[in-house]
Amino acid sequence: MLKISIILGTRPEIIKMSPIIKKLECLRLNYFILHTGQHYSYNMNKVFFDQLKLPEPSYNLGIRSGTQAEEVGKMLMGVETILQKESAEIVLVEGDTNSVLAGALAAAKLGIKVGHVEAGLRSYDKEMPEEINRVLTDHLSDYLFAPTENSRQNLLKEGIDEEKIVVTGNTIVDAVYQNSKLSEGNNVLEELGLEEDDYFLVTIHRQENVDNKERFHGILKGLESIGEEFEKPVIYPIHPRSRKMLNELSINVSGIRFMNPFDYLSFLHLESRAKVILTDSGGIQEDACILGVPCVTLRDNTERPETLEIGANVLAGTSSVEIVEKVRSILNKKHDWKHPFGDGKAAMRIVNELKHRFS
Ligand code: UD1
Ligand code: UDP
């Protein structure tokens, strides 16, 4: 019987793989989860397994954090050992993290087929470690599950065989649709004393933003200014990487409510009722677009250009003046786009495709 190894390591991979894991469970297919341990804090990892009711990983390599090379190098060795023991036919990875690259590379070198979920995204910015991971993983993969036609075109431009590519939609849509109802009754707004449509929700964690003091400073000043101008709370659940930098940065900002990262259902509830979402996260640009909430992206580029084209998202970079202007401008636009990320059946398409190709 076909054996699939799901390799994951970080918060967004757990969330975006969850619809696929559920489908594999439902069809009683033979699979196991290999966790690299890249994310390990309870609120970056286990809370999602618990809340999304996912089975425990069969293996956790416990790699944790390090330099880019340390993370990928240690993961490569760990993944290779497990894959040799388990003799899986397919390794499935999702997204663009170091865990994804290590999983795909270890598998490809062992001659195991690689399926890349969310293939073909490009920022064309090699300063992002994620862009390097995306490009390499796509070129190592045998099955490329592109979320949109735009991502399929990116792959074709790089000479990837069209037979290998299937446009499936993004599994984040499946995850949002599957969990939106469950998040409805969440009481996070009452707990935080917030009113619907009356706060800004912020996340920032990109290495090129938070590890660069000037950029991080510009963003924080921009957030302070929008809080003052619009007289609304600015809610910032802070990623551990950013928390570390903020502690070192000793800058004086007021009006931003820093808090710990949220569980998935609370976060979905907060996202769907925010006035505007400001973020440098990839997944949260998609969430905002799917939920119909305007998004201001705190970066100079995005690998999700579809969100810009339909007017759901604008790029603001990291200058405080630009951030305020972009919030003003997106608030003056209509919010009536139709999101381009699929119908919530991406996981079904991906699993069916794998079954079909292996039958
Ligand atoms: C990683 C991914 C990024 C993804 C993000 C999702 C890479 C190159 N980056 O970035 O693409 O958007 O995950 O959130 O793979 N830390 C903790 N607890 C944790 C995890 C991290 O305290 O559970 C802290 C550690 O101090 C660590 C820092 O966060 O040094 C960065 O962690 P790391 O996994 O290296 O990168 P992320 O910024 O999380
Ligand atoms: N998320 C969450 N709690 C939070 C912040 C984010 O559950 O406090 C979820 C969010 O809904 C999205 C995913 O985490 O599905 C995005 O992960 P992240 O921003 O860490 O990574 P990226 O998408 O940038 O790789």
Image (tube, rainbow, N blue to C red):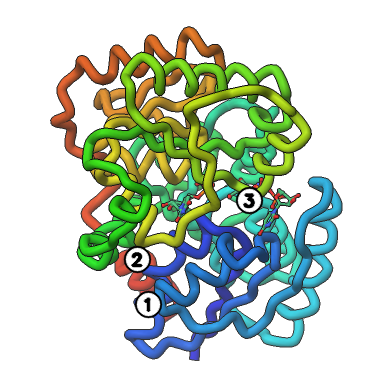
* 2 vs 1, front mark: 1
Q: Is residue 291 left or right of residue 243?
A: left
Tag 2 residue: 347
Residue at screen point 67% across, 65% down: 40
For badge 3, the amino acid type reads: Thr
**Left or right side of 190 for 38:** right
Can residue 82 be seen from the camera position used here? yes
How many other residues sit within 10 Å of disc 2, few (<14), some (14-19) or many (≥20)?
many
Q: Secondary structure at mark 1?
A: helix
The answer to whether residue 42 is left or right of residue 256 is right
Give whichever of discs 1 and 3 has the lower sequence position.
1
Residue 260, given in percent of the width and then of the height, sits at: 55, 52
Residue bearing mark 1: 22
Residue corresponding to mark 3: 97
Q: Would you say the beta carbon of the disc 2 residue lies within 8 angstroms of ligand 2? A: no
Q: Amino acid at mark 2?
A: Ala
Q: Quadrant of residue 133?
A: top right
- In this rendering, the answer to whether 289 lies above or below 181 is above
